[in-house]
Amino acid sequence: MKKVHIFALCGLIFGIMACSSEGEKHADVTLSTVQCGMCKKTIESGMAKVDGISKFDVDLNTKVGHVTYKASAIELAAIEKAVSALGYQANNTEADPIVYQNLPDCCKIGGMQ
Ligand SMILES: [Cu+2]
């Protein structure tokens, strides 16, 4: 009950934008190398283990990751690094080549050795 009350109060006084800037932030991460549902699963389950990230949804059609994270706990650059460590490119951060090598064949694209 108290939590609901604080949220309502925050919304009334500061507005939703001010609230979210203090807590959770949303960003879109371009995932240009995702191929299939397995990629989606790999990234979503991998990112779920990263501190500060509360949600990471991969949209396979647009190849965009919708991430919700705590700005006080993690930066976007660190999120990109975490995606890279799973073997996928995130924005301009290239995939870790060794991890990429070990991805299932269906998750690989041409152009990377
Ligand atoms: Cu895949």
Image (tube, rainbow, N blue to C red):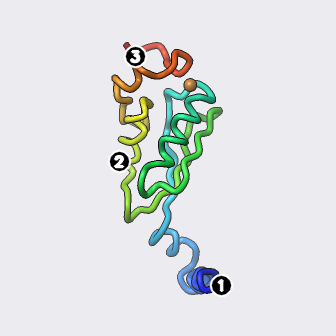
Residue 3 percent location from the top left of the image: 59, 81
| Residue occupied by mark 3 | 112
For label 1, being within 8 Å of ligand 1 is answered no
| Residue occupied by mark 1 | 1
Where 10 falls versus 56 (above or below)?
A: below
**Side of 46 where 8 appears, left or right:** right
Within 10 angstroms of label 2, few (less than 14), some, or many (20 or more) residues? few
Residue 15 percent location from the top left of the image: 57, 78
Residue 107 percent location from the top left of the image: 53, 22
In the image, what residue type sits under mark 3?
Met
For label 2, being within 8 Å of ligand 1 is answered no
Label placed on residue 50: none
- Dot 1 falls on a residue whose secondary structure is loop
Give the mark, 3 or 2, whose residue is nearer the N terminus.
Answer: 2
In the image, what residue type sits under mark 1?
Met
Q: Quadrant of the C terminus?
A: top left
Residue 16 percent location from the top left of the image: 58, 73
Q: How many marks?
A: 3
| Residue occupied by mark 2 | 77
- Dot 3 falls on a residue whose secondary structure is loop
Residue pictured at 38% horizontal, 65% vertical: 72
Within 10 angstroms of label 1, few (less than 14), some, or many (20 or more) residues? few
Where 96 falls versus 46 (above or below)?
A: above
Give the mark, 1 or 3, whose residue is nearer the N terminus.
Answer: 1
In the image, what residue type sits under mark 2?
Ala
